[in-house]
Structures are given as structure tokens and as C-alpha cells.
Image (spheres, coloured by chain):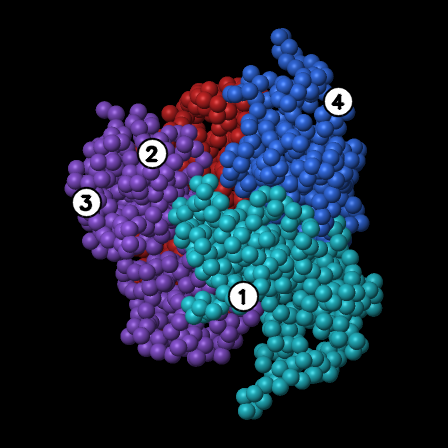
Chain colours: A blue, B cyan, C purple, D red
Amino acid sequence: MTKRIAITTGGGDAPGLNAVIRAVTLAATKRGWECIGIRSGFDGILHPEDFEGDGTIELTPDTVRGIAHTGGTILGTTNRGNPFNYEVENEDGSTTVEDISARVIEGFKRHKVDVLVAIGGDGTMGIAGQVADMGIPVVGVPKTIDNDLNGTIATFGFDTAVSYATDALGRLHSTAQSHQRVMVMEVMGRHAGWIALHCGIAGSADVILLPEIPFDIDKVAAKVAERNSKNRKFSIVVVAEGAKPIGGTAKYHQTGDVFRLGGIGELVAEELRLRVPNEVRTVELGHLLRGGSPTSRDRLLSFRFGAAAVRAIEENHLNVMVGLDPPTVHYVPLDECTKSIKLVPLDCDSIQTARDLGTCLGD
Amino acid sequence: MTKRIAITTGGGDAPGLNAVIRAVTLAATKRGWECIGIRSGFDGILHPEDFEGDGTIELTPDTVRGIAHTGGTILGTTNRGNPFNYEVENEDGSTTVEDISARVIEGFKRHKVDVLVAIGGDGTMGIAGQVADMGIPVVGVPKTIDNDLNGTIATFGFDTAVSYATDALGRLHSTAQSHQRVMVMEVMGRHAGWIALHCGIAGSADVILLPEIPFDIDKVAAKVAERNSKNRKFSIVVVAEGAKPIGGTAKYHQTGDVFRLGGIGELVAEELRLRVPNEVRTVELGHLLRGGSPTSRDRLLSFRFGAAAVRAIEENHLNVMVGLDPPTVHYVPLDECTKSIKLVPLDCDSIQTARDLGTCLGD
Amino acid sequence: MTKRIAITTGGGDAPGLNAVIRAVTLAATKRGWECIGIRSGFDGILHPEDFEGDGTIELTPDTVRGIAHTGGTILGTTNRGNPFNYEVENEDGSTTVEDISARVIEGFKRHKVDVLVAIGGDGTMGIAGQVADMGIPVVGVPKTIDNDLNGTIATFGFDTAVSYATDALGRLHSTAQSHQRVMVMEVMGRHAGWIALHCGIAGSADVILLPEIPFDIDKVAAKVAERNSKNRKFSIVVVAEGAKPIGGTAKYHQTGDVFRLGGIGELVAEELRLRVPNEVRTVELGHLLRGGSPTSRDRLLSFRFGAAAVRAIEENHLNVMVGLDPPTVHYVPLDECTKSIKLVPLDCDSIQTARDLGTCLGD
Amino acid sequence: MTKRIAITTGGGDAPGLNAVIRAVTLAATKRGWECIGIRSGFDGILHPEDFEGDGTIELTPDTVRGIAHTGGTILGTTNRGNPFNYEVENEDGSTTVEDISARVIEGFKRHKVDVLVAIGGDGTMGIAGQVADMGIPVVGVPKTIDNDLNGTIATFGFDTAVSYATDALGRLHSTAQSHQRVMVMEVMGRHAGWIALHCGIAGSADVILLPEIPFDIDKVAAKVAERNSKNRKFSIVVVAEGAKPIGGTAKYHQTGDVFRLGGIGELVAEELRLRVPNEVRTVELGHLLRGGSPTSRDRLLSFRFGAAAVRAIEENHLNVMVGLDPPTVHYVPLDECTKSIKLVPLDCDSIQTARDLGTCLGD
């Protein structure tokens, strides 16, 4: 029986989204099914008037040609769009939160959607579960740069981010060494330190600070001092966005100068300046980690996820998320993916590897 | 108790060897142990007179500094060196095969080696097993560009090769399309088609030919013709070195012109020229796949393998190979790794993905 | 007065063609002019029936969006299309050469073309001159991977090719050193050795062989031997496609084994095998040099050339080729560009640099 | 007659420094001369006690092996070291400026230096001129990421920086488009906008702000609004570090919120937020632009400069700076290089190209 699939991409973008869209479209077309893409999360059906056309894009082999190696998402995305908890702007400029999910379901019916393929992070998977509860079958595809989603060993976009951050560390090494500086590089990772840990090991950082291991700034300074004493008068520090000093950041925020500082990278730098003689500079990779062409590995993973989502639908395996359980792709109940965040286990072999290489983890 | 580790790298080189050497050295140093590297497989102890110094390199944090991102191996390698089956040149120029393993054992004793870390493919793992039988404890580290070694989901160097080949496919796409050509790209993979399959999917090849699936050249030509008919007058064909037509290559080798042709890529091209109107050109990536700086993923994997080898020694977990069983590194008895080659399973989800995307696999 | 510009891309493709097309289109649109692209050289107007539509593409800001960083040409290209010397297939399968330029002129009139922007190499510039003689004003934009066109210091695509070849040399270095091999890499350059010289210096090749300097194979072997003697038992040889041994290749072609060999790279390798103890391997970059995304420098150059072509038309500066005369773009009469090929001057500072670095140039 | 050359690298590091050092060393060795490198600008002879050894490095083919593709400088660098104007720390912690150039000259004599090769920017060239006046012959090699040095069309490191920044723009494009954001990217260029202009054109930025053209923030906002109205609801803005609004930054610095902002990129973003509905995000490339492996073009240029410096010495062509005057390397009197900064000419064809492409330059 022919089916009509809707695809949505939600949350921050990640390299590989377009490859997933292409794979779903081609695998569906092969089965004689139809595909549409909803623009900007759910906005395309909530606010079709905001878009040219009707808020959706007909997805065919022609419309998904040549997109697999591009970053971003041809559907657009938004951080606003939880229809169960939707931010509505009132006339007086204030905002209220409403449950407008009925309009989403109605939109799916208007577009004669049989199944929703929801590509996103834990927010999107949570919404997907609620949409499923309202009677629209859903298959989720995991997406997070941070790799902190349960139910899958890896998410697409993560390898691209680690690859970019590792290259950045290489660049900082040469300039740090020439100038005898400490370079502090901040990377994404609010809750989990996967990017920091992987790029830090691959790029031979001297210090890696993760949300999972509260750090002692004096230990960090001691590592820099130890290197100085061995005539390696430069050091590279990688800090995950969500890393925290033991006891929290409050005690470092009391002087006016430091208070104004934005990220944890700046704070670590400022504190190091008080403790080591080297010049200390910071770099924040920010949005550069999100963009760009996916690595070959992320393209492959995206294609596998997209094709597996269509096979799940064919096999009537619904209200699951596809995930990677090497060497194969498997299916996980949606709620298993969202009940917690996948943190870096403190005893995993990558952490042990970092310690074996002599890297300071701040503890 | 302090230990003295010898490291050897055997067989074709792969990006990541130096990162393994660095990880073993740093992890050993951290434990107060010593490390030496044997030059050119086992030649450094079999023929020390061929080298400056004594055929080994003292490995310290200083000697392994800055090598992790470099390709090749600082120890050198050789394809000659199975000491149980050693090719010896006689005075008359002929060669004889001898078992000179006793000299290897003697060499290890001369250098006071407690444990050997053998980095190599299935040949090296087989030798490692025999060395272990003779009383030198061994820990193996898997290395093969082709990813066809059992006991590990992935080998370092493989991601780098796939990444390079995928990039090459992108380059060929633009020129193939501009000139309406068929481009045939041959990649490594004598027994297993992992590189071809992964780069072929990631790089959106139209045809992927693997050793695991004997191909019908007429099916390949039909795919090209189908694309021509849809006004996509170019096609990209990826061929693994060990791909074979149904019935073998013999029947294609009867005309003088074709007989002289070297690789399977040339043969596929020649046969396609007889069947499709497009110009057909070939590219063979060859040694370019082996060289170069490892990807961030391969660096991380190499570091994890090297550190895990040292932990195995510390835990007295000997005569094993380290391997990747995501998300963790594990240890596998040496003989399990060598009793067969890890082929691409015909029903794995990557094969299904290729089919779902409409790729022709020649069958 | 509004104008209608036709763009054609002829000969082998080169990274940057699409950026030129985009620049011409945007600069023309800005002036209120119109642009069309002729498909596949002149075939779009000679054989419109071979194409969907009428053999041309309306070029607008929308149709040229997002193409600047892509390789190839959205117009397609062909090596067949000199309309003054056109290969026509007869009914019996034989081919005759005809002057069908009148049909080109007629085609331009049918499409109401005021000016032709011809992007191509010396073949295309020659045709452009003849088209100009027949009354269609022309502005040429130089395109050759080989950089051997007079009237411009640099052509787009050249930097991309050199960059790719230099990266390839880096990869070969690590594997050559690990295996103590001689690697011979053949690159494009039938008449001029610019690619070989630039990548050879940038990539620290030990030997660089150019069409401009006939080489003595014994000098090449001597360089390899000298390195072997200094315990650098590997060497990297770059050979331009058009390099020739002193006295020509004839004397090397007498043994059956060598006779069958294709390119000059294979011949150099075969002759070296007779003269040095190292294993010798070859790599031919071939079409990989043509494809791919242009470097930032080639993108900038392409944009500058495309915009300058439109300014030339606006200033009524016709029947010229745009060219780079650093720091500025200038205009050159078409016939000055085609009367000779731009060879590497034997006394230029790059040649001196290669010699100063100790590189063997085969003489 | 044999000569002894000293090399110094001063100021911020730039990709290509090591290739210059290698070229000077090899070209000198070829002539039977000797080379030493002074560590950290002039500190190696001013404060030899701060270093292991005597503050210099003997430079031989062995010590410069494998460094050409690495970023940074093996000699180290410093921003402190103008010996004619040297910052000395007093016992009470205050600093005084002294002329300690006599100690430099004395150092050169102690090391029996015949000629100094000074690699640096306009600061270093000024010092070089003064050193020459004191009797030590000098050849300068231009180095500045910013490309703002007179006497040369291009400096090494510049192409690498532009290449990196262009790649970053590509990454920002995909994420900006997916999220309908304005991305403001700040790049180096305090006095001259070469990096911003070149990467901005190559990377298809919508707005490019240079020090040479004071900008009107309302014009920038109008460009964003124009794109929004055409359903291109994202924009990319490149800002050179030294760009300034018409009338200076003072008027924007009056609110506390904005006052705290660091760079001009943040200021542009803040002002845009007041004027356009899009989310606005900033990225500052900072030190990432300095580091990393030089592009093939920068390696070639560095090699050419280094070799030319040695030829200048051989030809007794002293107290000059080598520079690029395509297609050749030439020599320029030192004082010609430092009397002014090379700004982007307002009527150059690159500026015209940007305007032809529809880019807003803020005016």
C-alpha cells in the first residue's frame, strides 16, 4: 500500500540532515511512496502563511539531488517549535505558552500524511512521542552534534564536529608553540563532553575539561606549570561549554572584570592568567562546529539512518527511533531515548586513554 | 614491576600507526616502563647491520612527540618479514624460505624485551601468535586499511581511506557531469569491499562492485543506460580491487587489447565502452589511500588501541588482540582474529542502504 | 542600452567555471542585462534537439545560486565543438570535418545575442577570434588547468590542481618513507610543466620532470642513489604528462614489456627499476586534478574574471580576453593569447628555487 | 667565500615561516655556507640564558627536515623584541624602554654572523633597516597574515588565512540559512581589509566591511532587509578587525550594554539586532587564522622567498627585502617597505567585483 511520509527537521542544525532527507526520499520513492518536507520544524504546517507555497516541499529524487554533501537542512529548522508547549506572541509583545498540537495533527491530516519521520534531538524525540500518542505514527532519527542522545552509539554531525575541532587544535598548536602561549578552546557540549573528549584526545590537548568531571583550576594550572618546567612552554586546553569548576562558577564571578565574561572558556583563561606566566588566549568554535559538509562517516551514517527509517515504516515498526548499535542499525522505543542524557562514562576506555596519555582532566 | 616493551609495525602502512606508537610509549612511560621500536617489521632484530644504530629505536616521550598526526610509521615497515617463513636470497640469486624465528626470539632476549606489541594485519597477527607460542608474550593491535580483520568493528586507517575516496568521488562527479562521462574508480579491497561500499554510499556512486557480490557487467551497463535515459548522462562506478564478474575474469581476457589491462577497474571500463555510448575513464587511487594524516576518528581509535594494549599488559591479559566493540575496546584471543576474513555481510544494513538509494551492486 | 549575453564553456572542465558563470550573470543582471548559457560548448545552438528545452539555459540570480563553490560547469562542456572545423558523423560511420560556423552565427541571432562570453583555453580563444571576425562581439575568459595560456599570469583551476597534487605528494611521502620506495606521480601538463613545478616545490619532491627540460634518466637514478646513500631510502618523483627523456621516448620503447606502457610516469618508473634497488610505484592523478571545489584563490579569480568580462562589455572593450596582471585584471587582444603557449621560463625564479632546494630537474 | 647567515622570525607567526627557514638553510648549505637560527626574535642573543643551549639553533638539512608543511616557527617568535626600543622590566615591576641594539650587534659578532635574514612584518623590516645601518648586512623576508606590507604583491600566510576564512564562511552559510540567521564573522585586518575582502568575495558574503571604507550600519541593515524581502532570510557579514562605522565607534559605545563589547564584530551584531528581525550571531576566527599548515601556494611562495634571500646575499644585493612582483621575485630597498601600509585601493578590480556581485560594502 502506498504511503505518504512527512519529514521534519527540528532544533539546531547538524551536518548530515540533508543526507537523511535524501535517503528517506529515495528509499520511499523506490517503494512507490510519496514524501513531503515540512518547513522550519512544524512551522510549515502551523503557519503555512509564513512561507512561499503551502509550508511544505514535495520531496522527489529531483528535489533531493546533490544535497547529501551540503550542511544545514533544505527544510529549515527552528528552536521555537514545540507544539505542545508553543510560544505565542501576544498583541502587547508578551509571550504565552500554549498547547497547539491539535493544529499539528490537523495539518498532517490536511496533507494526508501517513507517517512522520522526525529528525531531531531529545526535544524532537519527546515531541515525536507525543505526536505518536495522538495517533500519527512516527519514526525518529537522532540528531545532535553533542552525541548525548541515548539509544544510539553515534549521531550524525558529531564526527564532523570532532573533525573540525581537531583540525582547529592543530592550528592552535603551532601558534601556541611559536608564542609560548596557553590556548583555551571552547567547544559545544552543555551536558556531555563527547566533543571535547574526542577532539582533545585526537588533537593531543594537554587539558580536557568536561561537564562530567568538575575541575580544579589549580590542577589545570599545575599541568601548564609542569609543561613549562620541561621546556614545553605552551599548553592547549579544551573546554566543553558545560564544564564546571568544583564548587561551581560562583566564586569566580565576584570581581567585576570576570563577571562580564561570557563562556566558561573565558573564565578558565582568566583564572589561568592569575596562576601561570604564559600569555593565555581563547578561541570559541561556536557555530563553526554546526556547519559545513558532513564527513564521509557522517554521510554514511545519515544515509543508513534515513534508509532504515523507511524500512521501519515498511515493516510496520513504528514509534521508534533508529539508532546505531554497531555494526548494525537498530530500533529503539522513543521513550527510551529521552529519559536521560548519554553522558561520557567516567570509566570508559576513552577517559582511560586520555589519562594514559598524560592528559589532565582537571581532577 | 617495570617492563620493557618492543613495538613492531608490519605489512602495508596505514594512517594511525604513529599514533598507536605514541600511545603505547606514553602509557608505558607513565607506568615507569621502557619501550623500544623494532625497525622495518622484524628486520631491525634479524638484520641490525642494515640499519644505523642497532636496529631498534628507543621510544620516549621525546621521540614520539608530534608524530600522531603524521602518516606512515616512524619504525618503517616491510612486506617481507615473516620470520617463520622467511625469504632468504641465496648466492646464485635464487630465494629459499626458512624458519628463522629462533633469531627473533634471541633478538628479543638480547634487547631484554618482556612483551611484544605487534601492530599489523592478519599476517602479523598470525606471526604474533607463533611468537607467543615460543614464549614471548604478545599483544596485537589490528591494522588494515581494508577493515577486513575479525575481532574488531573497525581498524584505524580505514576511516582515512574512506574519507579520501569519498572526496575523490566528489571530484569525479563534477567532471563526469560536465563531460557526460562514466568514471570508474578503483579502490583497495582484495577480499572485502568495505572501502568501496562505504565511500560508494557516502559519495553517491551509481554502481558499487564488491568482492562479495560477483557482478554482471550487463547490469552495470543497464544502470548507466537508465541514467542516460533520464537525462543524467554520466555515471560513477566504484570498483573494489577484488571485485569479480560472474564467471570470473577469464572470458573478458581473450582479446589482446584487454588482456594487457591491469586492474579490474580497467576491465570494467573496457567492457562498458562496448556497451554504453558515453566516454568512459578510469582512476585508480592506489597508494594515495594509504598515505596522509589520519582523520580525527582514526587518531582517536589509534590512541585508544595503543593505550589499551598497555593496559592489557598491566592486567596480564596477554596473547590477545585489542579490538573495537563499540562503545568500548575489548580483547580477543589472537587466533580468533586470523581464522577468517571479515567480509561485508550480504544482508547488512549498509548493503540494504545502498539498494534503497537505488545503487546498482552488479547483481 | 540593455544587452543580452551568451556564455559558453568549452574544452576540459576546470574548477571555477561555475563561479565565472555566476559572476557574469550577477554583474549583467545588476546592469539590467540578460544572460543565457549555451549548453555543451556550442552544441546547444548547433544541435538544440539533443537537449531538453532549446539548448540554452536562462541565467538569472536564481539559476546561479549556490554554484560558485562547485566544480564542473552547469552548462556542460565538450571537446568536440570547433564550429569552424566540426567533426560530422556520416551515415556510413566515417567522419568528415566541416565549417558550420554560419549555423553558430545564425544561432546567436536566433537567440538575439549581443555579445558572447567564451570561457575556455587556447582552442576556445581561437574560435572566439573567428566568431568575432564574423561579427559577434566576444569577450574571452581564460581557462586551463595547465596554466599555459598567454595573456594572464594565472588561470582559475590551476591553484586547485596544484593544491590537490601537493596534498597527494604529502600522502605519498609518508607511505614511500615507511616502505623505502620510490613513488612516481604523474600530473597534467602536456606542453608546460607549471603544475609539476609548483606542486613539486610545494610538496618537496626530490625530482621534478617538465616538458621544458628534457631529462636524463640516469641523472634521476643518481638522485635516488644519492638519497639512498644518505639513509633517505625513499624518493618522490613528479612527472608532467608531457615530460620527455633526452632523445625522446623511442629508445625506451623497444622492449615489448615497456612498449605497452601508457604514460610517461610508467616509463620513468620502469627505467628506474632497472637502475635503483628500491621498489618503484606509480600514481597518476588524472581526472582528480580537474574536479572538485575550487580553492578560495580560484573562486576569487573566477569572480574577478567574470565581473571584468561584463565591465569590458559595458566599456565597449570587445574582442579581448580578460587576464590577470597582478594586482589587477587587464584586457588582452584575443590573438595575443593564442599565438604561442606560455611555457615555464628556464631562468624563472621558481626553477632557481627548485635547484636551490636541491631538487633534481633531470638535467 | 663561505658565509654564516643568521635567521630571525619576529612578530605574530604566519603559516610558511618554517618553509622560509628551510629554503634559506638548504640554499645556503648548497653554497657551502652556514646557518643559525636565533630563538624568539632577538631574545636568543639578548637573553641566551633564557634558553637551553646558547639561544641559537644550528640549521642544517637535518634540522629543517619535514618542517615545510608545518605552521608556526621552529625558532619561536615574540612581540616584545625591538632592540632599539626594548621593554625592560625594572625591579619595582614597572617597565622602561631602552635602546639595547648594541647588544644585538655584539651578539651577531659573537656568533660570527655575516648576514641577517630577518623574516617579519613592517616592525621587523624597520628594525632590520636599523641593524643594517649599524653595519650588519640584512635581507628581509616579508611576513604578515594581513598582506598589508608594501613592496610585495603577496605575503605568505595570507592565502592560508583567506582559505581558512572562506571555508568558515561556507560553514556559516549552511547554518545561517537553516536558522534564518545573520552571521557576523570577524577576521584579522587592523589597518587593511585584504583578508575580509578576499574571503568575503570567495565565500559569497552579503556584506564586507573594511578599514578602508567607513560603514553606515543602516546600509548594512538595509542589505539584510532586502534579502529578507526576497525570501533569503539569512545574511553573512564579514568584518575586518579594523573596520569602523562612519563617525567612529564612539556613538555606539554609550549604552552600558554595548560598551562592554570587545570587537567590532560584536558591535556590528549588536547594532543589527536593533534594526533587523533575524537572530544575529557572531564568530571571531582569531588565532585560528594564524595557525595550521600553509596552503600549497604559501609553501611555494615561502620557498621562493627563502631561496631568493640567499641569492640576494650571493649577488651582494643587501639591505633589501625580497618581494613578489609576479611572475617574479624582486628586491626592494628596506625603507620602501615600511614607509606606509599597503591598503586596499578603493578602485581596484576586487572592490569592483564585490560591487558587481551585489555585495554591500557598507557605503
The residue at 56%/49% (across/down) is B360
In the structure shown, which secondary structural element does the residue marked by tag 2 occupy?
Answer: loop
* Residue that numbered label 2 is attached to: C54
Percent from the top left, x then y, of residue D220?
44, 24
The residue at 65%/47% (across/down) is B352
Host chain of mark 1: B
Q: Residues within 10 Å of mark 4 (few under 14, many from 20)?
A: few
Of all residues, the one furthest to the bottom in this rendering is B92
**Is the C-beta separation of discs 2 and 1 under 8 Å?**
no
In the structure shown, which secondary structural element does the residue marked by tag 3 occupy?
Answer: helix
Q: Residue C130 got which mark?
A: 3
Specify the amino acid type for callout 1: Thr
Quadrant of the frame with the N terminus of chain C: top left
For marks 4 and 2, give the one nearer the viewer.
2
Q: Which numbered disc, 3 or 2, marks the residue that appears first in the sequence?
A: 2
Specify the amino acid type for callout 3: Gln
In the structure shown, which secondary structural element does the residue marked by tag 1 occupy?
Answer: loop
* Residue that numbered label 4 is attached to: A134
* Residue that numbered label 1 is attached to: B249
For marks 3 and 2, give the one nearer the viewer.
2
Residue D10 lies left or right of residue C113; in this view the side is right
For marks 4 and 1, give the one nearer the viewer.
1
Vertical arrangement, residue D242 with respect to residue C12, above or below: above
Q: Tell me the distance, in whole angstroms, between the alpha carbons under discs 3 and 1.
A: 50 Å
Callouts 4 and 1 in the same chain: no
Specify the amino acid type for callout 2: Asp
Residue B330 or residue D273, whichever sits in front = B330
Vertical arrangement, residue D280 with respect to residue A178, above or below: above
For marks 3 and 1, give the one nearer the viewer.
1
The residue at 54%/33% (across/down) is A60
Residue A205 or residue A85, whichever sits in front = A85
